[in-house]
Image (cartoon, grey):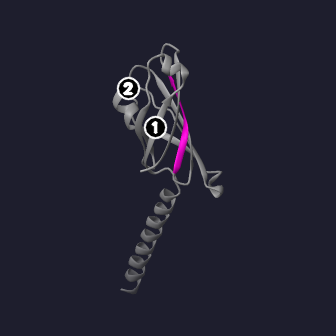
Amino acid sequence: MLMRNRIVLLALASSFVLVCACGIALAKDPFVGKWKVTISPGADAMAAGQKEIKDTLVFDHVKFHSEAFNKQNGFGPVAYELDTRGAPSGISAFTAEPTNSKGDTAKFTGNKSGSAIKGNIVWKKKDGTEWSYTYAGERE
């Protein structure tokens, strides 16, 4: 009986440690959540008729997507790279590169400082045309 109680206690303690460790690991991603941004086209994109876009960038611990780029151009959720080397000073960076069914890519790069986010997007079309954008906004 004593041995079984120890096994149960050990199993509970191990489960608690595992749950806490997962929570801490997930909590370290400073981008998780939704960010309201304004995307402004660069000269190349404006010349092609692109307009300013109000958008929401979504980070969910594993995947990133731009609601507007997804809805309007088919760039769905994709894994993103996180760089927290600047985190002690409050700055973190990310990179994500979704593709769409046409073979286009949209490389999103950005920095977060406090509740603000800003960055760049380079949309490379399958034919080689590139459109650049900048964005800035805040956590929702």
Residue in the foreground of this view, choosing between 60 and 22: 60
> Is residue 121 on the magenta stretch?
yes
Residue in the foreground of this view, choosing between 25 and 85: 85
Q: Quadrant of residue 53?
A: top left
Q: Quadrant of residue 49?
A: top left
Name the residue at 48% across, 19% down.
Answer: 125
Q: Is residue 17 above or below residue 36?
A: below
Q: Point out the frontmost of discs 1 and 2.
A: 1
The picture places residue 69, in percent across and down from the top left corner, at 40, 31
> Is residue 133 on the magenta stretch?
no
Name the residue at 49% across, 21% down.
Answer: 46
- Position of 117 with respect to 78 (left or right) is right
Residue in the foreground of this view, choosing between 121 and 65: 121
Identify the secondary structure beneath mark 1: strand
Amino acid type, mark 2:
Asn
What residue sits right under mark 1 in the picture? 38
Residue occupying the far left of the picture: 71
Name the residue at 55% across, 38% down.
Answer: 119
The picture places residue 74, in percent across and down from the top left corner, at 37, 28
Residue occupying the far bottom of the picture: 2
Q: Which mark is first along the chain, 2 or 1?
A: 1
Name the residue at 61% across, 51% down.
Answer: 91
The picture places residue 112, in percent across and down from the top left corner, at 56, 48
What residue sits right under mark 2 in the picture? 73
Q: What crowding class fits label 2: few (fewer than 14 Cα within 10 Å), some (14-19), or many (20 or more)?
A: some
Amino acid type, mark 1:
Thr
Identify the secondary structure beneath mark 2: helix
Q: Is residue 134 above or below residue 6?
A: above
Q: Quadrant of residue 44?
A: top right
Q: Main secondary structure of the magenta part?
A: strand
* Magenta-tinted stretch: 116-124
